[in-house]
């Protein structure tokens, strides 16, 4: 897979964005044939305030890389080597328990692949939003709901209605946008989006990518967008590359 970074001129606000340094990252999956590397010796630097697109074919280890950024690789997977340093957080791979739980969502916002299928079917989106806010000790829940409505409106939806809905009342594309809202709403400074536009039609894809870029700039984020489709990668001014297991 390949990484492309769009460098931005460093405005004062960009100074707040954290840098991310992935070093010599190797992740293996246990299989009947032994442990096979999905990510092998990857180095990737996300400079503060940049938006980086990682493009690679199916099975090249993109999602495994995304999970690693949150120290969320699940068995039969295992991070076998390397480090993921995030400014202000340290090595994410060394975080455990409560520290790790707090970092996920609050420090590192994320949309995992197929996020449209990961909502709770038994609770409205608004209830899940409040749960998320409470689990991260958000004091002003009203402001959280307001921000969520605004983000949803920017993505072309009736925010109040979406928050009152259950996931089965929303289309796949709407659920995907809800996932993006949930990734952004806690104001994390590092955001990881794994195939954020796959379930969307072309026009909606373009809109969502524009909004991701806008929010990225407004909030001075450090953003990683993963995609198998180079046309949906953020525009590139500088390139870097990394190779994975296969
Ligand atoms: N739970 C698992 N058990 C065994 N192998 C796995 C598991 N998850 C992923 N792998 C393997 O690790 C490799 C990388 O998978 P990963 O999902 O990270 O790729 P990807 O680039 O995100 O693919 P896609 O574009 O299809 O989303 C693949 O070869 C896959 O078969
Ligand atoms: Mg994937």
Image (cartoon, rainbow, N blue to C red):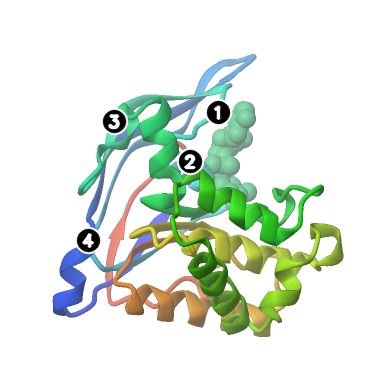
Residue 67 is labelled as 2
**Label 4 lies in ligand 1 vicinity (Cβ under 8 Å):** no
The disc, 1 or 2, on the residue closer to the chain's N-terminal end is 2
* Residue count near mark 4 (Cα–Cα under 10 Å), binned few <14, some 14–19, many ≥20: some
Residue 82 is labelled as 3
Say whether marks 1 and 2 touch (CB < 8 Å).
yes
User: Hey, which quadrant is residue 127 in on the image?
Assistant: bottom right
- The answer, for residue 128, to whether it is visible in the render is yes
Residue 6 vertical position relative to residue 87 in the rendered view, above or below? below
Tag 4 residue: 47
Say whether marks 2 and 4 touch (CB < 8 Å).
no
User: Hey, which quadrant is residue 235 in on the image?
Assistant: bottom left
Tag 1 residue: 74
Per the model, the C-alpha gap separating discs 3 and 4 is 18 Å
The number of numbered discs placed on residues in the rendered structure image is: 4
- The answer, for residue 244, to whether it is visible in the render is no
* Residue count near mark 2 (Cα–Cα under 10 Å), binned few <14, some 14–19, many ≥20: some
Say whether marks 3 and 2 touch (CB < 8 Å).
no
- Tell me what residue is drawn at x 66 percent, y 81 percent: 204
Per the model, the C-alpha gap separating discs 1 and 2 is 8 Å
Per the model, the C-alpha gap separating discs 3 and 2 is 14 Å
**Label 1 lies in ligand 1 vicinity (Cβ under 8 Å):** yes
The disc, 1 or 3, on the residue closer to the chain's N-terminal end is 1
- Tell me what residue is drawn at x 28 percent, y 60 percent: 240
The disc, 3 or 4, on the residue closer to the chain's N-terminal end is 4
Mark 1 lies on a secondary structure that is: loop
Q: Position of residue 147 (x, y in %)?
A: 51, 72
């Amino acid at each position: 897979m390949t990484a492309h970074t769009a460098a931005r001129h460093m405005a004062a606000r960009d100074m707040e964005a954290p840098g991310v340094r992935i070093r010599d990252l190797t992740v293996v999956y246990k299989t009947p044939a032994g442990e096979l590397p999905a990510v092998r010796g990857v180095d990737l630097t996300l400079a503060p305030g940049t938006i980086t697109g990682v493009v690679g074919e199916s099975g090249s280890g993109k999602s495994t890389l995304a999970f690693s950024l949150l120290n969320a690789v699940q068995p039969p997977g295992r991070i076998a080597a390397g480090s993921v340093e995030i400014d202000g957080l340290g090595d994410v791979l060394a975080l455990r328990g409560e520290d790790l739980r707090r970092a996920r969502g609050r420090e590192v916002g994320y949309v995992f692949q197929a996020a449209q299928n990961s909502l709770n079917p038994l609770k409205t989106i608004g209830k899940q939003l409040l749960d998320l806010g409470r689990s991260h000790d958000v004091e002003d829940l009203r402001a959280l709901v307001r921000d969520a409505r605004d983000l949803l409106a920017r993505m072309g939806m009736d925010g109040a209605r979406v928050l009152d809905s259950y996931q089965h009342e929303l289309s796949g594309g709407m659920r995907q946008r809800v996932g993006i809202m949930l990734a952004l709403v806690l104001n994390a400074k590092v955001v990881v989006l794994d195939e954020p536009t796959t379930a969307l039609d072309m026009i909606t894809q373009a809109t969502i990518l524009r909004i991701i870029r806008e929010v990225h700039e407004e909030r001075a984020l450090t953003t990683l967008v993963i995609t198998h489709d180079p046309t949906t990668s953020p525009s590139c001014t500088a390139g870097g590359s990394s190779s994975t297991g296969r």
